[in-house]
Image: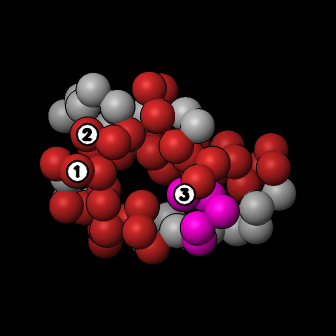
């Protein structure tokens, strides 16, 4: 499901919120800079992976059990 932005995604999707809250705070803060670009759980995990690769935040393993497909 597509949401308007990251704020709506983590407000309305329990699984996305739980995943987001499991991330280190520096990544959470960085993700808010891309608020309008993150509309799905896939966008969220892709951005986390991109931030890890680009900004060297350190590995954050994607916990697949957070999302029910």
User: Could you tell me residue 31's position as x and y percent?
Assistant: 55, 46
Quadrant of the image occupied by residue 26: bottom right
Quarter that holds the N terminus: top left
User: Could you tell me residue 50's position as x and y percent?
Assistant: 67, 43
Q: Is 68 situated above or below 50? A: below
Q: Residues within 10 Å of mark 2 (few under 14, many from 20)?
A: some
Say if mark 1 contacts mark 2, CB within 8 Å: yes
Q: Residues within 10 Å of mark 1 (few under 14, many from 20)?
A: few
Cα–Cα gap, marks 3 and 1:
14 Å
* Extent of the magenta region: 24-28
Residue 23 visible to the viewer: yes
Cα–Cα gap, marks 1 and 2:
5 Å
Between residue 46 and residue 13, name the one nearer to us.
13
Residue 25 in the magenta stretch? The answer is yes
- Which numbered disc covers residue 41? none
Q: Residues within 10 Å of mark 3 (few under 14, many from 20)?
A: some
The secondary element bearing badge 1 is classed as: helix
Which residue is at a point 59% across and 71% down the rendered structure image?
A: 24
Residue to which mark 2 is pinned: 8
Which residue is at a point 25% across and 61% down the rendered structure image?
A: 15
Quadrant of the image occupied by residue 56: bottom right
Which residue is at a point 70% across and 68% down the rendered structure image?
A: 59
Residue to which mark 3 is pinned: 28
Residue 5 in the magenta stretch? The answer is no
Which residue is at a point 58% across and 37% down the rendered structure image?
A: 33
Cα–Cα gap, marks 3 and 2:
15 Å
Residue to which mark 1 is pinned: 11
Quadrant of the image occupied by residue 57: bottom right
Residue 46 visible to the viewer: no
The secondary element bearing badge 2 is classed as: helix
């Amino acid at each position: 499901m597509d949401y308007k932005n990251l704020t709506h995604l983590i407000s309305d999707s329990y699984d996305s919120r739980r995943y987001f809250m499991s991330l280190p705070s520096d990544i959470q803060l960085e993700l808010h800079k891309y608020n309008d670009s993150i509309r799905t759980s896939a966008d969220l995990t892709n951005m986390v992976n991109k931030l890890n690769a680009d900004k060297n935040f350190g590995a954050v393993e994607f916990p697949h059990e957070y999302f029910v497909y």
